[in-house]
Amino acid sequence: MNVTAIIVAALVVGCVGIILGFFLGVSGEKFKVEVDPREEAVLGELPGNNCGGCGYAGCSGLAAAIAKGEAPVGQCPVGGDPVAAKIGEIMGVSAEAGVKKVAFVKCAGTCEKANKDYDYTGITDCTAMAFVPNGGPKSCNYGCLGYGTCVKACPFDAIHIVDGIAKVDQKACKACGKCVAACPKNLIELVPYEAVHLVQCNSKDKGKDVMAACSVGCIGCHLCEKNCPNDAVHVIDNVAYIDQEKCSGCGICAEKCPKKIIL
């Protein structure tokens, strides 16, 4: 073995390494992207769930948007007002108190109350029901299928299937909107946490067809609408909707509802 050759090779490799290191160091300084220190501070206050409920690609995306002034300091639904207040201090702005929201499933068609057209055996996923007869075994084409696509989508373990329909744990829910996007029936919406009356049905069928499919579905009778003193309830496409900004929580709509579908 030629010792001289080994030494020369080692020197060549070492010199190449030094040159490359110097070049990379100079390039890194020349082309480095300056990061706003506020962005890093904001990121440190965000919960780190990376759920996407804010509308950005994870917490880092939201932190960058807040630092640039492209997003409000209270954009994170998981952190809520406490996190918004801390980020507001970093950004030098006041954080307005937001309305706490929670996911709500517009269906009360449990196994006992909802009729079925047939028994289904197969993939237990709501999105797969688009490929089976009548969109699933339940007679109501608008109701919760109960196969847990929303459960799988929730990063906070806040939604579970109970007696054939999805139920939301209001205390665990962070209103990230993952379940809303995942539900193929568009049954889940974000509502104010303090809402006292909600319509637990989404069927747009006429009353006769609703009663044939589910014992607790909204039949669009308009009694809730006619008796609301605040003009907060309206029947649209055969199903009642409550304007939470107008609702005073008097409970008259729930009392008048013959199907007792208003919580």
Image (cartoon, helix red, strand yellow):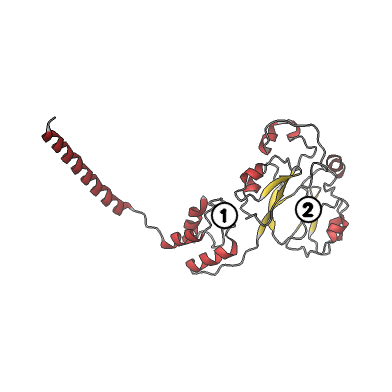
Q: Position of residue 30 (x, y in %)?
A: 29, 53
Q: Is residue 236 above or below residue 9?
A: below
Q: Quadrant of residue 4?
A: top left
Q: Which mark is residue 199?
A: 2
Judge the density around disc 2: few (<14), some (14-19), many (≥20) Cα neighbours within 10 Å. Answer: many
Q: Is residue 132 left or right of residue 4?
A: right
- In the picture, the quarter occupied by the N terminus is top left
Residue 68 in view, yes or no: no
CA gap between label 2 and label 1 equals: 26 Å
Q: Is residue 98 above or below residue 182?
A: below
- In the picture, the quarter occupied by the C terminus is bottom right
Q: Is residue 175 left or right of residue 13?
A: right
Q: Which residue is rendered at x = 15% and y = 35% of the image?
A: 6
Residue situated in front as seen by the camera: 82 or 171: 171
Q: Is residue 42 left or right of residue 79?
A: left
Q: Position of residue 232 (x, y in %)?
A: 78, 60
Judge the density around disc 1: few (<14), some (14-19), many (≥20) Cα neighbours within 10 Å. Answer: many
Q: Which residue is rendered at x = 66% and y = 41% of the image?
A: 149
Which circle's residue, 2 or 1, is located before the other in the chain? Answer: 1
Residue 261 in view, yes or no: yes
- Residue that mark 1 sits on: 54
Residue situated in front as seen by the camera: 75 or 111: 111
Q: Which residue is rendered at x = 84% and y = 57% of the image?
A: 254
The disc labelled 2 sits on which kind of residue? Val
Q: Position of residue 21 (x, y in %)?
A: 25, 47
Query: Which element type, helix, strand or loop, lies under badge 1?
Result: loop
Residue situated in front as seen by the camera: 158 or 236: 158
Q: Position of residue 238 (x, y in %)?
A: 81, 48
Q: Which residue is rendered at x = 67% and y = 49% of the image?
A: 159
The disc labelled 1 sits on which kind of residue? Cys
Query: Which element type, helix, strand or loop, lies under badge 2?
Result: loop
